[in-house]
Amino acid sequence: MTILMETRLSSNLYIISDVNIRDNNNVITHIPLKAMWDTGANKSALCLEIPKANNLAKIGTDLWGYKPNALIRDKFLIHIEIGERCFESIEVLEAPYKATNFDIIIGMDIISLGNLSIIKTNNGNIAKFEINED
């Protein structure tokens, strides 16, 4: 079976929940986000104000960038819904900048699970993300 998602490059997706919220049987909320697909990012990341504004629970810290200039950033465990597909228990960092045109960076940790194509159209670029589930 192929799951296909076609969307504008600055696409909408949802954090279904903070894993800690879901595990405590609380209400699972959908937090709408605008995404930027970034093949140069090893990990996915949330922009600066998103974790605090949505009461996400920090699970630790990790490095953002490369030594010797790497920054220590907070890390969160979330579920992300892209199209009809849910990616569970994804570790994301808090990026060191505020959201402008996007709220989350989708990095290679998610992109590598499928095939990402960028298609140029008269109305702008479209991201096509396919996941084969056999």
Image (spheres, rainbow, N blue to C red):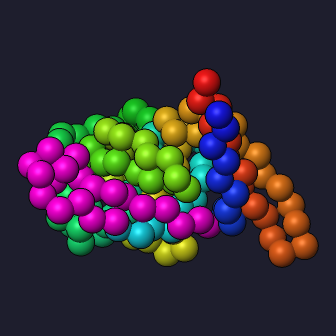
Name above or below for residue 70 compared with residue 123: above
Q: How many marks?
A: 0
Residue 100, given in percent of the width and then of the height, sits at 49, 75
Q: Quadrant of residue 87?
A: top left
Q: Residue at x 36, y 40 (%)?
A: 88
State left or right for residue 59 relative to residue 9: left
Residue 132, given in percent of the width and then of the height, sits at 64, 31
Camera-side residue of 41 and 28: 28
Task: Pick out the residue farthest to the top.
Answer: 134
Where's the N terminus, which quadrant? top right
Q: Is residue 130 visible?
A: yes
Residue 48, given in percent of the width and then of the height, sits at 33, 64
**Residue range of the region highlighted in magenta in the rendering:** 10-30
State left or right for residue 58 relative to residue 103: left
State left or right for residue 78 relative to residue 126: left
Q: Is residue 27 magenta?
A: yes
Q: Residue at x 49, y 62 (%)?
A: 13
State left or right for residue 74 relative to residue 82: left
Camera-side residue of 98 and 129: 129
Q: Quadrant of residue 56?
A: bottom left
Q: Quadrant of residue 23?
A: top left
Q: Is residue 2 magenta?
A: no
Where's the C terminus, which quadrant? top right
Task: Pick out the residue farthest to the left.
Answer: 24
